[in-house]
Amino acid sequence: MKKLLITLGVLIILTIVTAIISSANESFTVVAILILAVLKFIGVSFYFMEMKKAHVFWKASVLIFLLLFTTIILLQF
Amino acid sequence: MKSDTISYKNIYYPPGGILLWIIIFLELFTFGIALIAMVYSSKEAPELFHESRLYLNSTIGVVNTFFLIVSGFFMAVSVHNLKQQKLDKTKLFLKLTMLGGLLFLALKGYEYFDKIDAGFNIGYNTFFKYYWMLTLFHVVHVIVGLVILASVYFGLSKTNSTTKLEDVEASAAFWHMCDLIWLLLFPIIYLLF
């Protein structure tokens, strides 16, 4: 329960940081927004969905999907 | 309520069940490919995508992210309570989860009404074609998720409930999937271009 509350707090903070960063028109904005999205994705999948307790195959599958997705998106920007 | 001991360390039993995780990955790849196609299309008309993106209200996107994250938290707490055989708390947090989903849909409905009113419909330009297809497809998932959660709620409310912990975990995994998809859609559609 405590871990769920901490995860919720972190996810809300990351969402607020995303909103603040998006208003800055800097070169790092795209990378920063995507990294924050990946962190939120990991927070939800590993803690809310309890993937942290799952077999390494499922953990690796989630991380490989995220790596592939963000790499392809970043290569196009 | 029936409950069995599930070992998540078994490769065939990820939290929510293997079938649901196959669906989750199929959905993530579908939305992922569509988002990649959107970013690829934006290279042909970057100014059009940038200008169109500015018509979207990112504050609504942030608030909707907040609704889904908090709703996901309530869902996780609901499953946590069910594992401890606290049925009343499970049902309470299940209702709060559904409230989060309904608030998301209400705000999305307001956003859609605003866009249609301003003339930004699906045929307006390429950006809005992607915007409508991706966000509407996601909304359909949220509606399906709410129907599943409602059926689980009523299943748990029966006096001789046959709803298993695995059923609740599977519906929770579907609900979190809606959250995961939104976490990919929101930054790309509302913020990146």
Image (cartoon, helix red, strand yellow):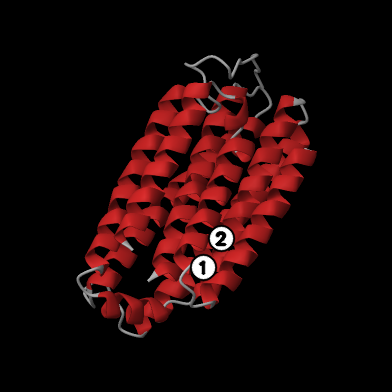
Instruction: Using the image, name the chain to which the residue with label 2 belongs.
Output: B
Secondary structure under tag 2 reads: helix
Q: Residue at x 40, y 50 (%)?
A: A70
Secondary structure under tag 1 reads: helix
Q: Residue at x 44, y 50 (%)?
A: B181
Q: Position of residue B148 (x, y in %)?
A: 50, 40
Q: Position of residue B156 (x, y in %)?
A: 64, 31
Does residue A51 appear in this view? yes
Q: Is residue B100 above or below residue A6?
A: below
Q: Is residue B104 above or below residue A59?
A: below
For residue B65, the mark is: 2
Q: Is residue B101 above or below residue B1?
A: below
For residue B61, the mark is: 1
| Amino acid at dot 2 | Thr
Determine contact: label 1, label 2, CB under 8 Å: yes
Seen from the viewer's position, the closer of residues A68 and B21 is A68
| Amino acid at dot 1 | Gly
Q: Is residue B71 above or below residue B126?
A: above
Q: Residue at x 54, y 14 (%)?
A: B10
